[in-house]
Image: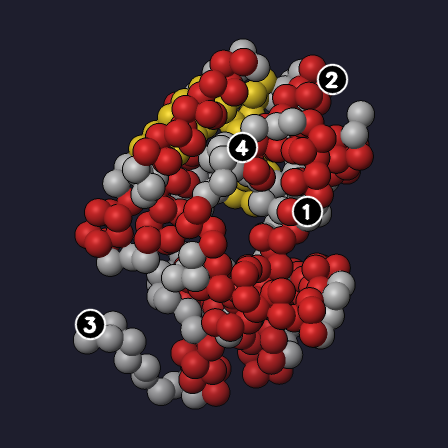
């Protein structure tokens, strides 16, 4: 068993990502990351009796290249004697109609397809191939956008699908670097397809990947991936603590119910008033309440409400 096999198996067991005998939908694009994930899970499946189904979504963004990606995944699934499901959509057309970026439109359509396929086949877990380099790229993208602690914590090993909270997304490769995956694929002679759009500097993520991170590693911190992942672990743990404190305060004060239900005006013993809470908890309380009623959240809105709670705030012509 290779080092990567052993690490993935340990991650799955230690973090309880998959149960023995579980049905798993493996999201496979045909690129290095997902093909490595598929081969690794397939090698381990006989030991753990996982029932794998391969799912591929064709974004139709690169013409014949997109079709070649689908063909490779289909052939690989057939060679492994695994069920294969394909979906496709015109992402550019959907992006224009929905007024979304191509990247966000692709993400939405992809998650819709995976969740729908999992539900139809009564599968409760979808395995994704996100890895350590993805986490670092996402961290810097969110830093540049001004994200808070919850956003900077990045992807989790296990999280609910954004489409259906009853379906869980698991990421067994989250501590493996791209270089490690490439070395594993080379040694195992794993076939995969290179996406030419990954080198295009039109997308912010690609500029972070191909320009910003190499500069930071070369000129400032050679061990950038390790230090950023450590920081994300720290920020994530602290963010979880703040979130739990906010939820407990809302529960104790009767403000955790559906919108419109009045809060209990009588504070129970030992429960502080809102203005006595730590600032971080105040912000998370407001974030949770705004999200509950479907209001888009940003730092300026939360601060205006936190500091001047009885002053109306206009979010738009009708809101």
Compared with 91, 102 (above or below) is: below
Q: Residue at x 73, y 70 (%)?
A: 221
Q: Residue at x 44, y 46 (%)?
A: 196
User: Mark 3 and mark 2: span between their CA atoms?
Assistant: 57 Å
Return the mark for residue 47. Answer: 2
Image location (x, y in percent) of residue 50 = 63, 19
Compared with 152, 266 (above or below) is: below
Q: Residue at x 21, y 47 (%)?
A: 93
Q: Is residue 304 left or right of residue 8?
A: left
- Of circles 4 and 3, the one toward us is 4
User: Mark 4 and mark 3: span between their CA atoms?
Assistant: 50 Å
Image location (x, y in percent) of residue 235 = 68, 66
User: Mark 3 and mark 1: span between their CA atoms?
Assistant: 50 Å
Residue under pointer 3: 318
Residue under pointer 1: 179
Q: Nearer the viewer, residue 113 or 261?
A: 113
């Amino acid at each position: 068993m290779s080092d990567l096999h052993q690490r993935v198996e340990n991650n799955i067991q230690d973090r309880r990502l998959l149960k023995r005998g579980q049905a798993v939908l493996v999201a496979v694009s045909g690129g290095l990351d997902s093909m490595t994930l598929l081969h690794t899970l397939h090698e381990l499946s006989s030991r753990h009796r996982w029932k794998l189904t391969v799912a591929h979504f064709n974004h139709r963004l690169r013409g014949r290249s997109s079709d070649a990606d689908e063909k490779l995944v289909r052939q690989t699934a057939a060679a492994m004697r695994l069920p294969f499901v394909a979906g496709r959509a015109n992402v550019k057309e959907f992006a224009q109609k929905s007024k979304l970026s191509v990247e966000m439109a692709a993400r939405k359509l992809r998650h819709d397809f995976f969740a729908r396929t999992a539900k139809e086949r009564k599968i409760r877990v979808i395995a994704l191939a996100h890895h350590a380099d993805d986490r670092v790229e996402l961290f810097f993208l969110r830093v540049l956008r001004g994200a808070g602690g919850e956003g900077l914590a990045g992807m989790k090993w296990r999280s609910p699908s954004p489409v259906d909270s009853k379906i869980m997304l698991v990421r067994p490769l989250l501590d493996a670097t791209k270089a490690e995956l490439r070395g594993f694929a080379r040694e195992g002679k794993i076939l995969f397809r290179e996406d030419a759009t990954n080198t295009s500097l039109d997308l912010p993520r690609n500029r972070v990947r191909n320009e910003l991170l190499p500069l930071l590693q070369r000129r400032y911190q050679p061990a950038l991936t390790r230090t950023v992942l450590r920081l994300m672990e720290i920020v994530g743990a602290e963010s979880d603590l703040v979130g739990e404190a906010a939820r407990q305060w809302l529960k104790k004060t009767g403000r955790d119910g559906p919108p419109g239900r009045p809060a209990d005006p009588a504070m129970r013993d030992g429960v502080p008033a809102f203005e006595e809470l730590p600032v971080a908890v105040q912000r998370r309380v407001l974030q949770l309440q705004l999200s509950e009623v479907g209001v888009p959240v940003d730092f300026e809105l939360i601060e205006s409400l936190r500091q001047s709670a009885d002053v109306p705030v206009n979010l738009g012509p009708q809101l």
